[in-house]
Image (cartoon, rainbow, N blue to C red):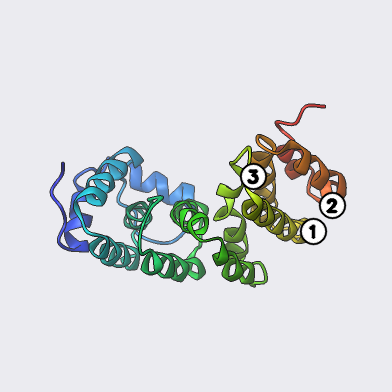
Amino acid sequence: MSALPASAVEAIAALMAHEEPGRAESSVAYHKAERRYLGVPNPAINELTRDWRQGLTLDQRVALARDLWDSDIFEARIAAAKLLVQARIRPDTAVWVLIKSWVPQFDSWAIADHACDAGGRRIMADLTRLDEVEAWTRSDHLWTRRAALIITLPLTKSNHPGPEETAARDRVLGWAAGYVTDSEWFIQKAVAWWLRDLSKHDPDRTRTFLNDYGMQMKPFARKEAGKYLSD
C-alpha cells in the first residue's frame, strides 16, 4: 500500500511521481478545458486512490477529496471523485453534499463522468435524492443538465428492478424525453447513452421511448440508443 497522504499537497505530490513525459500536453489538447494537467495515467490514479480509500477514514476522505477538487488540477479532481466511489457509505450525507457542490463546476466530460460515477452510488443508496437531481434538468448550465442523466445511469443496470427503481427509471426517462429537442451534442449523447445502457436490461422500455421520441433525436443519437436492440 502506498503512503497515506496527510494533505492534498502530499496527495498531489504522490500523483506527480507517476507523471509521464508528454502526457500532460496531449491531455490539454484532448480535454480542451483550461486547467493544470500533470500527465498521470488512469491506472496510477486508480492504484493510489484505492489505497487511500482503504487507509483513510470517511471524514479524512471527504476532506481530502474537497481539497483535491479545489486545486483544479485535472488528475487531482479525478482522484477526488475516485476517493468517494463506494457503494456502501454510512452516513453518506457529507459525501452527497460534496458531490452536489461539484456539479455546477463541471466543464468537461471526463471529470464530470468520474464525479457522477461516485454520485450514482449515492443516488442508488437513497432514491429520494432524485428530487434534487430533477432540478438540474432545468439548469442553464449544459454540464449540470447532462449530469442529471449521467449520475442516474445505475438505474439502467438491473434486469429485475423493484417497484421503487422502476418508478425512478420511468422518472428519468421523462427527463430524457424533455431533452430530445435539445440540440447540444453532449445532451443528445447523454440521452443516447442512457437508452443504450437501458436497452441491455429493459429493451421494451427503450423501444417504446424510441417509438415515441426517436424522430426528435439527432440521427447519431437515435442510432446509438438503438445499438443493442434487435429488429
Mark 2 element type: helix
**In the structure shown, which secondary structural element does the residue marked by tag 1 occupy?**
loop
Tell me the distance, in whole angstroms, between the alpha carbons under discs 2 and 3.
16 Å
The location of residue 156, given as percent across then percent down, is 62, 45
Mark 2: give few (<14), some (14-19) or many (20+) Cα within 10 Å: some
Circle 1: residue type: Thr
Viewer-proximal residue, 126 or 179?
A: 126
Q: Is residue 97 depicted above or below 177 in this figure?
A: below
**According to the image, label 3 marks what residue?**
193
Q: Which residue is mark 2?
A: 216
Name the kind of residue labelled 3 in the image: Trp
Sequence-wise, which precedes: disc 2 or disc 1? 1
> Residue 181 shows which numbered tag?
1
Q: Percent position (x, y) of residue 12?
A: 23, 56
For residue 151, what is the image quadrant? bottom right
> Distance from label 2 to label 1 (Cα)?
6 Å
